[in-house]
């Protein structure tokens, strides 16, 4: 809530209606007093969990609060005096009042008027207009806040803004001629400078700018033009093929990146070049580049993700980091969802021993999501494509350390991020002079890039710096003088030996920036190291003003020296550093103070040593040592054992927000369960620990801590595995210490020989002390670690020397490390932590077999054997592969080598030709690779005037196009199961996702058109039409007059000279010689028949037939039986009453808590609870349409609910009794609680692909494998003699409409665009007829024929037959309702036409499936959800109107579903993350509406009295365990459709009796007239 100061008189004169109760005033007054800050305009407060607000006051606005100290505050809108960049609102196509070309622009005019910059929101506008648009405005902060330049929205981080506020280079003054000099910047790999003299347009390959005469569709084609040109003409085809495979594993989609589907080319090519450049490099390098890519960060919404600490400090709100990337980087890019053996087979566990073991949990995702905070795009620069948004999507992202979470993070395998890294306190003295020390050239700037020095110090002569003397050792290393003594500066310098110190270098602990010669600087990059979160003997450190404190480890160089006279220990201190920004340990600080006759002190503020020094001390942001002690305590959350770090400095100073007693920064602790101690909680008096206290209002324990460190090994470890399992604390490389420091002892005579070396400290006088360092080589990955022989644990609640409590009863947890200091954060450490997280992913045991499986699939084997996966995974792990026949070796020998991986995929023993005779071997080919393969094999040649190939609308037509991947799940799900024999054989067929009737027709049409008439747009061709006027629709096959290019092999005259030989060669080129004898004979026969009158047409016909063959579209061997396939019987008109079911899925996970909102006040499950818990995601009351829920079952509690105000037609349908809502529905396998849901749930929760598949299947235990809920329902209806019509709109019907083979009519996929004729003829003389030969080519196949070939052949003839039927059904059908524009509307128009054609199709039960994607709103949820609902509602309204016009509204029911619900609490991107239970609805004329069924869950346990304890179904962050399963809804739907018998319902819903959920019944959901009952 936001409050603004007002005159005291307003507190006394306020109207009674705006007054609040005294107890509310008391709470708010205390909060406002505590939070008053330097901002004099507004104060923001966060209402505490246990704070009391009178129920009558919860919804009040604009009231006043007297503070009792003569000040008064008024409650204001949360955006009052918030500063925004309003540039977006000045564009002519955004603000409704603007005119094109800025002829009239009220926002711009207001700014230009110079009368102030406050915009007043007009009272005539509804607030929804503000809330739905404000996310388009760059948010700067509150009026009066001080904002760091790098925290500005990207559009404001410009040179002009920097100069306006006094920033920029000192030479960048106004009027300086050099200000206009271009700046040299670091480009992306292989970037070249622009050539302004280059001519061109999007037609001939120029893409550096968007010319005004080109539309966005043509600009979109530019990136695909580049891809096609390389795919068709580049000689490095294997590199390109590997890049294509990588791009499908680490997928980005232009459809999920704001504004990226319009003009942008270079950014997508830059991203794709990661894969081209590293195709035979290392996968870790690929993943790191991808992780730093702005495109990936925007798509998976971690760009600008900020830590909970940041939000707490800036806004006083608890907001969690976005979880999107943290989930998908594991699920899709590295480790996968289930633990795997080395051969890719799953590791099983659970109670039944048959459940795949999860690789990670949602707790892991929440923890690691904190490691993906702080990323932001680099500032815009030149030499790159100029985007309308002016966003830099080219360069690797930067880290804004202020946004970064800096607390410990428990990662995979129970290891903290940072384990096995050396402790910073253990680095050798003056590590900047040691072997391996790294220096980066800064050039003429003294501002470091990886450290946090104030940019204002840059080239400031007042700043005291470290300057090297010419005779010093470090000077020589950095200067590298040539023969004349001139320095030859390298961009990076790494010391290869230890150096001796000289001058100032001998007096300092730590080096930041060093001046080598005047005007040339290097930055020292300290090696990666970590700090332990808990330590003993801490000292208080304070900011320069002396008003904020924290604890620091006295051995770490994290603070500066502040010194007082011994008689004035709490007075003004003096600064005692050798250079500005110096950090040192406490011991060094004490020595510095002693050198100036002073001592460290608990100062009140800091001055200077030399009073004549004019250095601006107000710029010192880092902390300084005091002599006061400081205790590090642990706040323990007993519900899950998580811990927060609390600093308790002596002397009563205010504490840094993230380590205060009320910190929300909890992280997972690893407790030692072997001690027998109980988890401290208020219920057990904090476990009886004497130094713990109960924090009653939070239900937690605050305990003192002591650190215990003990030896891990007293002798040499048995093997590396033993050492790596026990040793978690890293150590510096012993060779960086002085000679003679260590005694080296290699392991011998054991399995550790050659893999473990012990380094004993010579001054210890004994071996295997706690300071012994082991050098351990991990056999699986080849990595080498230096590990300290110590186990560090934290004891809770007792003093270090306590003997009053038995040691066995003391709670212990592992001492967690963290990279970013809690008191002195540096950008450097954010990068180090990112690398450590990437290492956890890449080097996980799962990654090699997981990626091996993916690579094998992308190279053409859908179901590789365990041996094949093991061979490829081994090559990935070892980094090498030896070809078995020649002995040739591939790879660098490094883990993750992609050259070795690729060689193992292509050259292993399981790639031999003999295996193609196995019916389960091979795959369907990717649609796009078939197109490119045809063009490349048959030597496509473009016309000179059209040198670049443009293939149009390939995604809707065949399912694939370059740079048009639909989502992060790429083109194909690796686990996709198609209908038919492949599923019966337990095979996956990823490419079958696009094996639908419309796409089969489009593919064959495109091939036939290319073969007969060349590349052009007529007759359903893939290409563009010529724009030179040379066009003629009436051309015969073989006439390429209209084309922009054509296939040149074989020459058409070869049809006369050697037709049969040419066909044989075509078989080799297009099917790798797999064309069966029977199919070859059929093609030759067709050729001979046509060639008898026209040899050219005979050859063209043969090419068409080969490109339609199963051998061309799959990679197996086909063996036909020479029998024709049976045709499905046609339906006669049905005499039975008609019913239709439409299943509409909101794919991506709709945030249904902003669709259905409780409307009660003050109670549990009320609007007040909803608004409190949802925070900034909550709909405001003016954004809600009320609905009456009084007829609902009592479990809903509220009689009043509300709908999102975009759902006006749904509100009307609900009010008229045609819509019912289902509350808290989801995938339930068993009855579960918060304590056992992970163990009892087989479905992989919170994962898109798994959860949407479960929604479609409703069969978690695969009792009816390969089937879906609509397929089984159709089977049951067919068994009851109903005439069924199963339809899927646009996409593959599997698994939703998949039933048992042969039971029901095959499902029909219909394109939302309607029906495209098959093999359209150019004119009446086009007599090439492929159908007779197609029926022969695709006849029945034998038992040993390829199942993938069968999948193609069985689909082709069905697709052609269904296409004709759909032409007949849809061709003349018209609708009366006025449908809006859009893809969803087109789907519902097709459904409406099919329902209207029910009589001519002869069905009495139609089942439709349609999806509506785009609901995965991790970012700006309210804004994007409004857009989606604004599209949905008019479509539903038009559909309802149409059904009523047809007289079928009472016979139709529409049911909605989604992957899952979403978190109620917001993430840092103003979005919500994956959750579980959600709310859905059904609508239709027979629906018993105006009710809410199910149980709307409690978010908190006892709102408003208890604002802290989560509700019984709230797992975390508002992830709700469903109260009803998906089965419950389908039980009622199946009964309404006509399935009444219990045993048949059990077949439709195999898990309905075991799912732990009550069922809805037909009478619950539908009005059933008596005549229907009878």
Image (cartoon, rainbow, N blue to C red):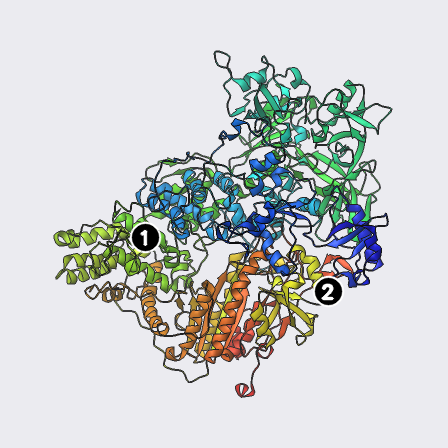
Whether residue 1264 is visible here, answered yes or no, is yes
Residue 1027: x percent and y percent? 29, 52
Q: Which mark is residue 1164?
A: 2
Q: Going by the image, does 362 lie left or right of 1441? A: right
Image quadrant where residue 606 sits: top right
Q: Going by the image, does 1325 lie left or right of 918? A: left
Asked whether 313 or 1075 is in front, the reply is: 313
Q: Going by the image, does 330 lie left or right of 1024? A: right
- The residue labelled by disc 1 is 931
Q: Which mark is residue 126?
A: none
Q: Are marks 1 and 2 in contact (CB under 8 Å)?
A: no
Residue 586: x percent and y percent? 74, 27
Report helix, strand or loop for mark 2: loop
Whether residue 1149 is visible here, answered yes or no, is no
Among numbered discs 1 and 2, the one appearing first in the sequence: 1
Mark 1–mark 2 Cα distance, whole angstroms, equals: 59 Å
Residue 818: x percent and y percent? 65, 38
């Amino acid at each position: 809530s936001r409050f603004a100061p007002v005159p005291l008189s307003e507190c006394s004169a306020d109207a009674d209606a705006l007054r609040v109760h005294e107890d509310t005033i008391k709470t708010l007054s205390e909060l406002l007093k505590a939070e008053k800050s330097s901002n004099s305009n507004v104060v923001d407060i966060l209402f505490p969990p246990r704070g009391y607000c009178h129920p009558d006051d919860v919804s009040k606005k604009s009231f006043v609060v007297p503070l009792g100290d003569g000040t008064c505050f008024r409650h204001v809108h949360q955006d009052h005096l918030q500063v925004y960049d309003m540039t977006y609102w000045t564009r002519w196509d955004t603000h409704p009042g603007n005119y094109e070309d800025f002829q009239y622009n009220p926002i711009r005019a207001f700014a230009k008027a110079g009368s102030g910059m406050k915009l007043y929101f007009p009272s005539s506008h509804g607030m929804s207009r503000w809330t739905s648009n404000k996310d388009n405005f760059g948010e700067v902060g509150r009026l009066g806040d001080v904002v760091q330049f790098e925290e500005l929205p990207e559009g404001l981080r410009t040179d002009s803004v920097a100069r306006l506020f006094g920033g920029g280079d000192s030479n960048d003054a106004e009027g300086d001629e050099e200000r206009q000099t271009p700046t040299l910047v670091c480009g992306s790999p292989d970037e070249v400078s622009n050539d302004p003299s280059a001519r061109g347009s999007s037609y001939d390959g120029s893409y550096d700018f968007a010319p005004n005469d080109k539309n966005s569709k043509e600009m979109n084609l530019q990136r695909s033009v580049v891809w096609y040109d390389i795919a068709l003409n580049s000689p490095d085809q294997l590199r390109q093929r590997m890049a294509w495979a990588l791009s499908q594993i680490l997928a980005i989609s232009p459809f999920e990146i704001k504004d990226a589907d319009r003009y942008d080319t270079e950014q997508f090519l830059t991203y794709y070049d990661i894969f081209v450049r590293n195709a035979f490099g290392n996968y870790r390098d690929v993943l790191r580049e991808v992780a730093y890519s702005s495109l990936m960060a925007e798509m998976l919404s971690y760009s600008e993700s900020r830590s909970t600490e940041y939000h707490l400090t800036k806004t006083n709100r608890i907001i969690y980091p976005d979880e999107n990337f943290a989930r998908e980087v594991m699920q899709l890019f590295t480790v996968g969802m289930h633990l795997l053996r080395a051969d890719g087979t799953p590791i099983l566990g659970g109670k039944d021993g048959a459940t795949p073991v999860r690789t990670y949990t949602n707790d892991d995702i929440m923890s690691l999501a904190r490691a993906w905070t702080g990323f932001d795009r680099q500032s815009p620069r030149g030499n790159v494509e100029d985007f309308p948004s002016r966003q830099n999507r080219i360069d690797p992202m930067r880290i804004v350390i202020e946004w970064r979470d800096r607390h410990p993070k428990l990662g995979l395998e129970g290891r903290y991020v940072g384990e096995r890294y050396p402790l910073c306190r253990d680095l050798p003295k003056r590590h900047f002079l040691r072997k391996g020390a790294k220096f980066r050239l800064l050039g003429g700037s003294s501002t470091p890039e990886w450290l946090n020095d104030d940019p204002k110090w840059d080239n400031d002569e007042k700043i005291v710096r470290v300057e090297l003397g010419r005779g010093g050792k470090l000077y020589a290393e950095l200067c590298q003088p040539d023969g004349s003594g001139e320095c030859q500066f390298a961009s990076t310098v790494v010391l290869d030996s230890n150096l001796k110190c000289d001058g100032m270098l001998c007096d300092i602990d730590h080096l930041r920036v060093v001046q080598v010669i005047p005007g040339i600087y290097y930055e020292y990059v300290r090696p990666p190291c970590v700090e332990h979160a808990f330590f003993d003997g801490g000292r208080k450190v304070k900011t320069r003003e002396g008003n904020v404190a924290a604890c620091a480890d006295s051995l770490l160089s994290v603070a500066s020296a502040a010194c007082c006279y011994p008689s004035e220990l709490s007075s003004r201190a003096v600064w005692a550093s050798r250079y500005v920004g110096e950090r040192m340990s406490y011991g060094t600080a004490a020595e510095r103070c002693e050198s100036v006759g002073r001592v460290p002190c608990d100062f009140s503020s800091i001055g200077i040593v030399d009073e004549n020094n004019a250095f601006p001390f107000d710029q010192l942001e880092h902390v300084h040592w005091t002599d006061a002690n400081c205790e590090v305590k642990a706040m323990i959350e007993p519900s899950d054992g998580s811990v927060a770090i609390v600093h308790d400095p002596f002397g009563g100073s205010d504490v840094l927000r993230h380590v205060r007693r009320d910190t929300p920064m909890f992280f997972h602790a690893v407790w030692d369960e072997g001690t027998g101690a109980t988890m401290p909680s208020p219920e057990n008096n904090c476990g009886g620990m004497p130094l713990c206290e109960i924090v009653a209002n939070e239900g937690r324990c605050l305990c003192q801590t002591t650190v215990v460190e003990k030896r891990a090994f007293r002798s040499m470890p048995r093997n590396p595995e033993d050492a790596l399992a026990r040793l978690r604390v890293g150590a510096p490389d012993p060779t960086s210490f002085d000679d003679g420091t260590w005694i080296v002892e290699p392991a011998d005579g054991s399995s550790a020989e050659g893999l473990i070396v012990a380094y004993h400290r010579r001054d210890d006088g004994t071996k295997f002390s706690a300071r012994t360092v082991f050098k351990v080589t991990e056999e699986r990955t080849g990595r080498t670690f230096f590990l300290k022989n110590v186990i560090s644990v934290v004891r809770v609640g007792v003093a270090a020397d306590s003997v009053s409590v038995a040691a066995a009863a003391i709670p212990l947890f592992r001492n967690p490390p963290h990279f970013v200091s809690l008191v002195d954060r540096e950008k450097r450490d954010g990068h180090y932590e990112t690398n450590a997280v990437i290492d956890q992913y890449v080097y996980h045991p799962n990654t090699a077999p997981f990626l091996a499986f993916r690579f094998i699939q992308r190279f053409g084997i859908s179901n590789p054997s365990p041996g094949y996966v093991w061979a490829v995974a081994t090559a990935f792990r070892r980094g090498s592969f030896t070809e078995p026949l020649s002995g040739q070796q591939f790879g660098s020998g490094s883990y993750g080598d992609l050259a070795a991986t690729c060689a193992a995929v292509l050259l292993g023993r399981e790639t031999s030709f003999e295996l193609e005779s196995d019916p389960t071997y091979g795959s369907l080919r990717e649609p796009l690779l078939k197109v490119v393969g045809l063009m490349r094999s048959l030597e496509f040649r473009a016309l000179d005037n059209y040198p670049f190939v443009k293939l149009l609308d390939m995604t809707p037509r065949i399912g694939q196009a370059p740079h048009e991947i639909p989502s992060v799940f790429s083109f194909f799900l690796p686990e996709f199961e198609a209908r038919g024999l492949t599923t019966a054989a337990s095979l996956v067929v990823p490419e079958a996702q696009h094996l639908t009737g419309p796409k089969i027709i489009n593919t064959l049409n495109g091939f036939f058109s290319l073969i007969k008439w060349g590349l052009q747009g007529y007759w359903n061709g893939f290409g563009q039409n010529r724009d030179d006027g040379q066009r003629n629709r009436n051309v015969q096959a073989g006439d390429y007059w209209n084309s922009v290019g054509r296939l040149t092999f074989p020459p058409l005259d070869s049809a006369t000279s050697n037709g049969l030989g040419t066909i044989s060669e075509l078989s080799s080129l297009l099917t790798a010689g797999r064309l069966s004898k029977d199919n070859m004979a059929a093609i030759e026969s067709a050729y001979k028949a046509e060639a008898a009158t026209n040899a050219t047409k005979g050859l063209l016909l043969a090419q068409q037939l080969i490109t339609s063959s199963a051998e061309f579209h799959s990679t197996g061997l086909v063996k036909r039986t020479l029998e024709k396939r049976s045709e499905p019987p046609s339906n006669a008109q049905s005499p039975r009453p008609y019913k239709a079911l439409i299943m509409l899925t909101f794919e991506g996970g709709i945030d249904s808590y902003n669709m259905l909102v409780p409307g009660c006040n003050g109670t549990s499950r009320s609007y007040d609870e909803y608004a409190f818990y949802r925070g900034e995601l909550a709909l405001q009351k003016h954004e809600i349409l009320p609905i009456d829920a009084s007829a609902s079952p009592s479990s809903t509690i509220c009689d009043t609910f509300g709908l999102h105000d975009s759902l006006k037609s749904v509100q009307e349908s609900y009010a008229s009794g045609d819509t019912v809502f289902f509350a808290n529905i989801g995938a339930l396998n068993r009855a579960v609680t918060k304590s056992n849901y992970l163990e009892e749930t087989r479905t992989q929760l919170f994962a898109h692909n798994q959860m949407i598949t479960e929604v479609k299947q409703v069969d978690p235990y695969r009792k009816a494998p390969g089937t879906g809920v609509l397929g089984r329902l159709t089977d049951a209806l067919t068994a009851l003699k109903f005439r069924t019509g199963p339809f899927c709109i646009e996409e593959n019907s599997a698994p939703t409409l998949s039933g048992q083979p042969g039971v029901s009519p095959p499902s029909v996929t219909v394109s939302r665009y309607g029906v495209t004729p098959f093999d359209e003829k150019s004119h009446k003389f086009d007599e090439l007829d492929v159908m007779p030969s197609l029926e022969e080519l695709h006849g029945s196949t034998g038992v040993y024929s390829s199942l993938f070939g069968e999948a193609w052949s069985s689909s082709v003839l069905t697709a052609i037959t269904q296409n004709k039927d759909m032409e007949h059904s849809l061709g003349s059908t018209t609708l009366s309702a006025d449908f809006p524009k859009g893809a969803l509307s087109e789907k519902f128009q097709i459904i409406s036409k099919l329902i209207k054609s029910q009589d001519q199709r002869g069905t009495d039960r139609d089942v439709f499936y349609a999806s509506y994607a785009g609901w995965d709103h991790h970012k700006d949820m309210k804004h994007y959800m409004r857009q989606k609902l604004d599209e949905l509602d008019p479509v539903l309204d038009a559909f309802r109107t149409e059904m009523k016009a047809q007289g079928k509204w009472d016979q139709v029911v529409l049911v909605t579903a989604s992957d899952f619900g979403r978190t109620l609490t917001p993430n840092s991107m103003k979005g919500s993350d994956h959750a579980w239970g959600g709310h859905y609805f059904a609508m239709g004329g027979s629906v018993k509406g105006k009710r809410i069924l199910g149980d709307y869950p409690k978010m908190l346990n006892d709102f408003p009295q208890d604002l802290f304890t989560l509700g019984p179904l709230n797992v975390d962050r508002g992830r709700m365990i469903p109260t009803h399963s998906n089965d419950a809804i389908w039980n009622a739907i199946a009964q309404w459709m006509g399935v009444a018998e219990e045993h048949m319902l059990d077949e439709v819903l195999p898990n309905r009796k075991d799912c732990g959920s009550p069922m809805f019944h037909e009478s619950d959901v539908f009005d059933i007239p008596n005549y229907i009952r009878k």
